[in-house]
Structure formats: structure tokens, C-alpha cells
Amino acid sequence: MLHTRFVTRAVYTFICAIGLALTFAMSGCAKKPCSNECEWHGLCTPKGADCHAASDADCRDSKACNWYGKCSAKAGKCVTAVDRDCRISNKCKQAGQCKARKGKCVAVSNADCKASEFCAKSGFCRLTRSGKCNK
């Protein structure tokens, strides 16, 4: 699941990477000190010498959200905090890990596993104690 804002950032990052010094209304190449951290980890806002996640929107646009469910900003980092974080990630669709528990996305029932791509493609349809689906 790609969000429009993520795609827009990726285009700007590409334009910056190929050396076109264009300035855009959202942000220019020279004004993007956190671009790599933003794309991968949702750490889009400079704070001193570091970058941090200032909002859930920063996190939702990152690859960490898309792949691992780290879609909520907490203490300047992107974390898995609520079930919605997991439901919008690839972990839910692919591995049936659609519930947030202790900062991670996990499967909580055999039904979660059976609804996953891993079940359909590889037979990983049974819930284990670790919150993962297996054969």
C-alpha cells in the first residue's frame, strides 16, 4: 500500500539524486536533510543534528510502516502502537499479522493466518504461540 505523499517524496528524492537542483513548493533538495531517514523510517523532521518523527503522518508515509506496521509516532520514532498500524502494512496482507501486541504486529487467530497470502501460497495457515503463522 503506497500513500500519495510517499510517492511524491520518492519522486523528489529521485530528482535530487540525479542532480537537478529544482525547488518545489513542498520542499527542495537543499532543504531535505532527513530525506533518506524519512523515506525508510519516517524520521522526517530535523531536530538538532538528528531527524525524528513529528507526526503519525510522517510514519505512515515510510517504508517501515508499509512493511512492518511502524505507523505511529511516539517519542520521535515510528512504532507499532495500534491494530490499524498492522492492518495497513504488508505484514497483515502477507503474513496474517494484523494485530498490534507489545510493539509488534502479530497474528492472534488461525483465521488471521488463513486470510494471509502465505497461507494461500505456502500453506502457513496455523497460528503459533509466537504470533506467527506456520504449517
Image: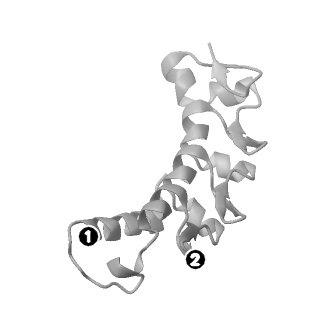
The residue under label 1 is which amino acid type?
A: Ile
Quadrant of residue 74 within the rendered picture: bottom right
Q: Nearer the viewer, residue 105 or 49?
A: 49
Decide: is 93 above or below 40. Answer: above
Residue 67 makes an appearance in the image: yes
Mark 2 surroundings within 10 Å by alpha-carbon count, few (fewer than 14), some (14 through 19), many (20 or more): few
| Rendering coords of residue 23 (x, y %) | 31, 85
Quadrant of residue 126 within the rendered picture: top right
User: Which dot marks residue 135?
Assistant: none
Residue 28 makes an appearance in the image: no
Report whether 20 appears left or right of 74: left
Decide: is 108 above or below 64. Answer: above
Q: Secondary structure at mark 2?
A: loop
Mark 1 near mark 2, Cβ–Cβ under 8 Å? no
The residue at the far left in this view is: 19
Report whether 49 appears left or right of 23: right
The residue at the far front in this view is: 49
User: Which dot marks residue 48?
Assistant: 2
Q: Which colour assignment does the render follow?
A: one colour
Q: Secondary structure at mark 1?
A: helix
Q: Nearer the viewer, residue 132 or 1?
A: 132
Which residue was labeled with disc 1? 15
Q: Nearer the viewer, mark 1 or mark 2?
A: 2
Q: Nearer the viewer, residue 131 or 49?
A: 49
Mark 1 surroundings within 10 Å by alpha-carbon count, few (fewer than 14), some (14 through 19), many (20 or more): some
| Rendering coords of residue 36 (x, y %) | 42, 61
